[in-house]
């Protein structure tokens, strides 16, 4: 029988997989929550375009989460029982820049800027 902690982790991993699938993404849980390592690292594999991102899921009743710098690989989902926000999604900066930002750019016209990050206003 699985420990209470493992059962809780499995539950939240399944919840995030269902959430990602509801949003139209391909996502699947890793066997044994990534304990096998190698190609089975992480808790979830999240398909974003041509990229398979490795997701770690951390759930806590309160806010005593591990330092994200020690646990993130590609993406980290933090979820807590109470408080706002309940869920945080943390990307590795390189992963966001190389894999996520290009997808956002190709699917979004954006706000016109003057090249220096300042919004151009219609007069």
Image (cartoon, rainbow, N blue to C red):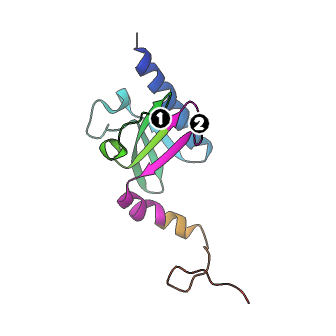
Give the residues in magenta: 79-101
What is the crowding at mark 2: few (fewer than 14 residues within 10 Å), some, or many (at least 20)?
few
Q: Which mark is residue 21?
A: none
| On screen, residue 3 above or below 86 | above
Q: Nearer the viewer, residue 102 or 115?
A: 115
Which of the 4 image quarters holds residue 35?
A: top left
Is residue 55 depicted above or below 117 in this figure? above
> Image point 40% across, 14% down: which residue?
3
Which residue corresponds to the image point at 49% horizontal and 83% vertical from the top-left?
116
**Where does label 1 land, which residue?**
63
SS for callout 2: loop
Which is nearer the eye, 28 or 57? 57
Direction from residue 40 to residue 47 in the image, left or right: right
Q: Picture quarter containing residue 65?
A: top left
Secondary structure under badge 1?
loop
Quarter holding the C terminus is: bottom right
Please identify the quadrant where the N terminus is shown.
Answer: top left
Alpha-carbon distance for marks 2 and 1? 9 Å
Instruction: Give residue 85's position: percent from left, percent from top.
Output: 58, 43
Q: Are marks 2 and 1 in contact (CB under 8 Å)?
A: yes
Q: Is residue 84 magenta?
A: yes
Q: Residue furthest top?
A: 1
Q: Residue at x 32, y 47 (%)?
A: 69
Toward the right, the furthest residue is 123
| Between discs 2 and 1, the one toward the N terminus | 1
**Is 112 drawn above or below residue 103 in the view shown?**
below
Label 2: which residue?
Answer: 83
When the figure is inspected, residue 9 is found, relative to residue 109, above or below; the finding is: above
Describe residue 22's horizontal placement relative to residue 2 as left or right.
right
Residue 48 image offset from top left, x and y in percent: 48, 53
Q: Counting other residues with Cα less than 10 Å from the Cα at mark 1, is it few (<14), some (14-19), or many (20 or more)?
A: some
């Amino acid at each position: 029988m699985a420990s209470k902690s493992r059962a809780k982790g499995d539950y939240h991993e399944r919840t995030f997989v269902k959430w990602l699938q509801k949003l139209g993404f391909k996502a699947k849980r890793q066997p044994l929550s990534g304990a096998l390592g190698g190609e089975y690292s992480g808790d979830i594999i999240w398909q974003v375009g041509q990229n398979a991102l490795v997701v770690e899921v951390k759930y806590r009743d309160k806010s005593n989460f591990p330092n994200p710098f020690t646990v993130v690989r590609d993406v980290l989902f933090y979820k807590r029982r109470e408080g706002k926000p309940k869920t945080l999604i943390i990307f590795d900066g390189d992963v966001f820049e190389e894999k996520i930002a290009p997808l956002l750019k190709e699917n979004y016209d954006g706000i016109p800027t003057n090249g220096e990050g300042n919004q151009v206003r219609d007069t």
